[in-house]
Image (tube, helix red, strand yellow):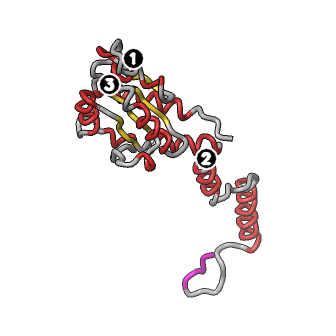
Amino acid sequence: MEIKANSSEYIYSAGELDKAEGKAIEELKARSQKPISDPDQWLEEEIKQNILLTTVDWTLNWARRSSLWTVICFPACCAFEVICTAASRFDISRFGMEIIRASPRQADLMITAGTLTWKMAPQVRRIYDQMAEPKWVIAMGACAISGGTFAHSYSVVPGYNRIIPVDVYVPGCPPRPEALLYGIRMLQQKIAKIKNF
């Protein structure tokens, strides 16, 4: 509303003011036919984005395959390849396997490599029995898989699978670090499919 200078009279009449006010109200009504969206709608979207549905089996298997604790059994010539796999170039620690355990009671993965004689077979079985459940075995190299070049000797066990159950075989004499990593990935895939209950 404007007021004339030095006067108490209004420029607009009361009817014009009512008309302008009515027009403003009608425009507001026209714009307000739909409700304004909730400003907290982002909260519901964030909850939907941050809820993860999974199973107990998947969670347990994820934890087990992501932190395999290893014990090495008679590595012989394959020891160099295991050492290379643990070094920075191949970095076995990315699979949660930084430390090779000194005690089988702390391990759940046995990597067997090297020639096994019948005299040492009971000790291998004892080491396997001392490992915590669930436990897995990787047979690395020709000697572990079939006895290797000494397979036909009277004193050599023709494969660790005669003494303990083997989950993954990594062939080679000796197998390269890439092959061992591939075997570890195969074992992780096998662990992911285990039904726990």
Total number of numbered labels?
3
Mark 1 belongs to which amino acid? Ser
Viewport quadrant of the C terminus: top right
Closer to the chain start, of discs 2 and 3, is: 2
Mark 2 belongs to which amino acid? Leu
From the image, tell me which residue sits under label 3: 115
The image quarter in which residue 24 lies: bottom right
**Distance between the Cα atoms at labels 2 and 1?**
45 Å
**Most prominent secondary structure in the magenta stretch?**
loop
Residue 169 among those drawn in magenta: no
Q: Residues within 10 Å of mark 1 (few under 14, many from 20)?
A: many
Name the element at disc 2.
loop
Query: Along the horizontal axis of the image, is 32 left or right of 146?
Result: right
Which segment is the magenta one? 1-5
Residue 4 among those drawn in magenta: yes
Image spot of residue 103 (x, y percent): 39, 48
The image quarter in which residue 156 lies: top left
From the image, tell me which residue sits under label 1: 146
Viewport quadrant of the N terminus: bottom right
Closer to the chain start, of discs 3 and 1, is: 3
Image spot of residue 152 (x, y percent): 35, 12
Closer to the chain start, of discs 2 and 1, is: 2
11 w.r.t. 167: above or below: below
**Distance between the Cα atoms at labels 2 and 3?**
47 Å
Q: Tag on residue 52?
A: 2
Q: Residues within 10 Å of mark 3 (few under 14, many from 20)?
A: many
Mark 3 belongs to which amino acid? Thr
Name the element at disc 3.
loop
In the image, what residue occupies the spot 58% across and 45% down? 59
Image spot of residue 93 (x, y percent): 34, 43
Q: Tag on residue 128?
A: none
